[in-house]
Image (tube, helix red, strand yellow):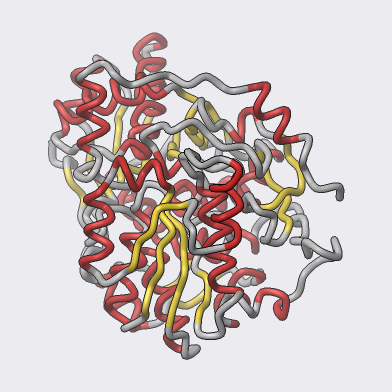
Amino acid sequence: MTDTKIVLPESEIPRHWYNLAADLPFPLPPVLHPGTGQPIGPADLAPLFPMSLILQEVSTDRWIEIPEEVRDIYRLWRPSPLYRAHRWEKALDTPAKIYYKYEGVSPAGSHKPNTAVPQAYYNKQAGTRRLSTETGAGQWGSALAFACSLFDIELKVYMVKVSYQQKPYRRALMETWGAKVVPSPSPDTNAGRAILAATPDSPGSLGIAISEAVEDAATREDTKYSLGSVLNHVMLHQTIIGQETKRQMEIAGYYPDVIIGCVGGGSNFAGFAFPFVGDKVTQGNQTRIIAVEPLAAPSLTKGLYAYDFGDTAGMTPLVKMHTLGHSFIPAPIHAGGLRYHGMAPMVSALYDHDLIEAIAVPQTAVFNAAVRFARTEGILPAPESAHAIRGAEIEALRCKESGESKVIVFNLSGHGHFDLGAYDAYFAGKLQDYEYPEEEVRRAQADLPKV
């Protein structure tokens, strides 16, 4: 078991982020202004983001240098370890070789600080004094609170109400790092008040929380908005995961046959998979790259590839993505970070061009897999990350049936130490499997903007 754990030295923290847009064999659809329907320019995004991040958002440069101050902070937890799941392989009785990249070693317990730190850094450089953001399960809010504490930036977090209620210790963690956290929909914004007036018991959604955070930033001169997924610059920052993984697999002596990540908005999947997609595009590698999403919010497998708003209130620019409709409110599954109506435009384009695959899995099967994994590998996974575990399990069992010894690598994007309430519900038999709500989605998709 000499390859049980592969750790790189600090000197091998990547010095550049990898921009997949430089290697795509097709153009990405333009982002459109919500009012005019015309392609937006950098000036249109200036009220929300510092220009340095806007330029990264639209860049087609293959490599973008990581500031040394950001790399210094990355050294707190990077490079993250890669493990060989020997015990899980044995429990599954599979000939597959299974590896997982573990991002739960960060201070916030997930992959999210990989982009939270540079976003806080660039905002500080631009003189931003306050940020607003949304969070689903609390992982992004925790990461940004951590990053803002390092750069002395005030932070307001709109936390999806059902997660705010399910995960009080995520809120406590954010408050420890100095953030102000409110449940969304909240009475603090016009968007929140409108939702509460129409649906007082709304569980909230990422789309609603985004509307509130965007409104907060747009109506205050001292505030910019920060997003933890979906946008190109967020995907870009996360590619240090895949770059490190490629180097670690090189040390292990294998190139992956199958790459797997959970997917909600797309950030951990993109950061892990994009360097391998780049190899697929430029070198013709035949690696299968699989995104695993919840059956309750299956934007890739069931959504339309169309222009839509990124938020519920229709305040954001229009992006072409796989969407269930911006007014769709997903069921209150415990994987709160995956309860989003849409998918990152770049991830959506890859799926549309058959460069990646996608599957949707039910909640109970995800927790079954998470517990089997925890009882062999010892790590308690976040419910979001457990979707990747379930995807890897499916592929490993296929290898058992076929006798093929494939190399499967997945991203374990965060730990579940703040998700014990979800595991408690699982052991009590209280978890529900929410099927794809076809009628609700059709109604929401009828409201798609006409482009």
Q: List the single residue furthest toward the top.
A: 401
Residue closer to the observer: 157 or 354 = 157
Residue 88, image x, y percentages: 21, 25
* Res 405 quadrant in image: top left
Residue 380 lies, with reference to residue 149, above or below; the image says above
Q: What residue sits 57% from the left and 49% below the top?
A: 207
Q: Which of the image's four quarters has the N terminus? A: top left
Residue 19, image x, y percentages: 56, 64
Residue 317 lies, with reference to residue 97, above or below; the image says below
Q: Would you say 398 lies left or right of 95 here? A: right
Q: What residue sits 25% from the left and 48% below the top?
A: 168
Q: What residue sits 37% from the left and 26% below the top?
A: 390
Please say whether residue 242 is visible from this viewpoint.
no
Residue closer to the observer: 310 or 249 = 310
Residue 176 lies, with reference to residue 299, above or below; the image says below
Residue 323 lies, with reference to residue 213, above or below; the image says above
Please say whether residue 78 is visible from this viewpoint.
yes
* Res 190 quadrant in image: bottom right
Residue 295, image x, y percentages: 51, 25
Residue 169, image x, y percentages: 22, 51
Residue closer to the observer: 301 or 63 = 301
